[in-house]
Amino acid sequence: MSQVIATNSEISRAAAILQQGGLVAFPTETVYGLGANALNPIAVAAIFEAKQRPSFDPLIVHIAEMDSLAQVAVTADTRVFDLAQAFWPGPLTIILPKSDLIPDIVTSGLPDVAIRMPGHPVALELIRQAGFPLAAPSANRFGKLSPVKASHVKKQLPDVSCVLDGGDCTVGLESTVIKILDDGFVILRHGAITSLMLSVVLPESKRSYENMVLEASPGMMKSHYSPEKCVYLIGIHPLPKDISEGGLITFIPKVDQGFKLQRHLSQNGDLREAAVNLFGLLHEMEEAEVQFIAVETVPETGIGIAVMDRLLKASYRFHTTGHYHE
Ligand code: TXA
Ligand code: MG
C-alpha cells in the first residue's frame, strides 16, 4: 500500500490553483476526486470538459466543516444533522435543496445538490485552504473505473497537472448517496454506509423507491465504472471457452483455475477488504496482458451490496442480456 501524503506546501499550491479557477485532483477515503470551486461555474465547466462527462450528470459538493452546509444547501431538517453527526467526515453523500450560491451547472439544473464531507485529511485541508466548497466527481474519464491511487488519475487524466497524493483510498468505493424523504430515505447509490447503518440513525420506515432511482439521480446508469476489457461475472455470464488468456479475480484465495493471471479480493472473506481492493485489482487487470476479466460474485450483504452494484455496472455493457437488477 502506498501511503504518500501530500505536503502542506503542495496543498497550498493546489489551493492557489483552485482559487485561480483551476482543477486539482485530490484523495478522499472513497476514491480520488477532480475538484474545482463549486461556486464558480466556469471552473466547474472545466471538470465536465476534462472528464468528457455529459452535462446532465450532476456533481457532489465537498465541504470541510458543518458551518459550510448552510452556504450550499437549504435545510432545517434535524435528520440531516443526525446523519452528519454519525457519518461525517465519511463516505455518505446527502441530496438536499440547493442554495442560490450553487450554480446550475453543478446540479445539472436540478433544484437539489449532493453534499459530502470527505474523511481524508488532505481533502479537508485542501478545502479549508481554498476557502470554498469543492465540486468534485471521481477523477476518471466518464464511465470508466474510479481511481483509488494517484497513479490511476495520472493515467486516465494526463492533462490534469495538479494531482495531490494521499496514498491508497481506504474505502475504495464511491460514497453512499441518499435522499431524505418525508417518511424515510432512499439510497441512490450503494456504498460503505449501508442501509442498516442508516436505519439506526433514521429509524422511520424506509420506503422503497427502486423505480425512482434513474429520475432522482441522472448519473446512476446501468453501465458505469467500466474497464476497457470485457468483464464476465462467474455464474452470471458464460465464460469464453479458452480461459488461458484471461484474468480471474476470486473472492477469497483459490487454487490456480487455469487463467493467465489470478488475484483475490480478500484474504479471508472480509467484504470491506473486498471493497477496498476491487477497483485496484480491476486497474491491475486492465494493465496486465490479459484479454478479458472474470470476477467471482460476492455475498450481497452489507458493503457487498455496493461491491456487486459496481461489478454489475462494470460488466453491463459487454453483455446485451446482462442480469441487471431492474
Ligand atoms: O465518493 C464519492 O462520492 C466520490 C468522491 C470524489 O467524493 N465522488 C463521486 O462523484 O463518486 P461522481 O460524480 O463520480 O458521482 C456522483 C453521483 C453521480 O452518479 C450523480 O448522478 C449523483 O451522485 N448526484 C450528484 N448530484 C446529484 C443530485 N443533485 N441529485 C441526484 N443525484 C446526484
Ligand atoms: Mg464517478
Image (spheres, rainbow, N blue to C red):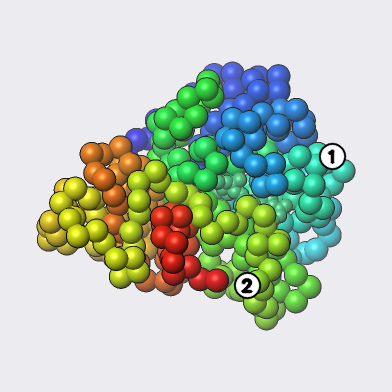
> Label 1 crowding class (10 Å Cα cut-off): few <14, some 14-19, many 20+?
few
Q: Quadrant of the N terminus?
A: top left
Residue lying at the far right of the rendered structure:
100
Residue 278 x/y as whole percent: 37, 52
Q: Nearer the viewer, residue 85 or 209?
A: 209
Q: Quadrant of the C terminus?
A: bottom right
Kindly tell me whether residue 54 is visible in this rendering: yes
User: Under 8 Å from ligand 1: the CB of mark 2?
Assistant: no
Can you say whether 107 is above or below 233 in the image? above
Question: Could you tell me which residue is drawn at 51 percent across and 52 percent down?
Answer: 224
Residue type at tag 2:
Glu
Residue at mark 1: 101
Residue 18 x/y as whole percent: 66, 24
CB atoms at circles 1 and 2 under 8 Å apart? no
Secondary structure beneath label 1? loop
Residue at mark 2: 210
User: In the shown orientation, is residue 232 left or right of residue 141?
Assistant: left
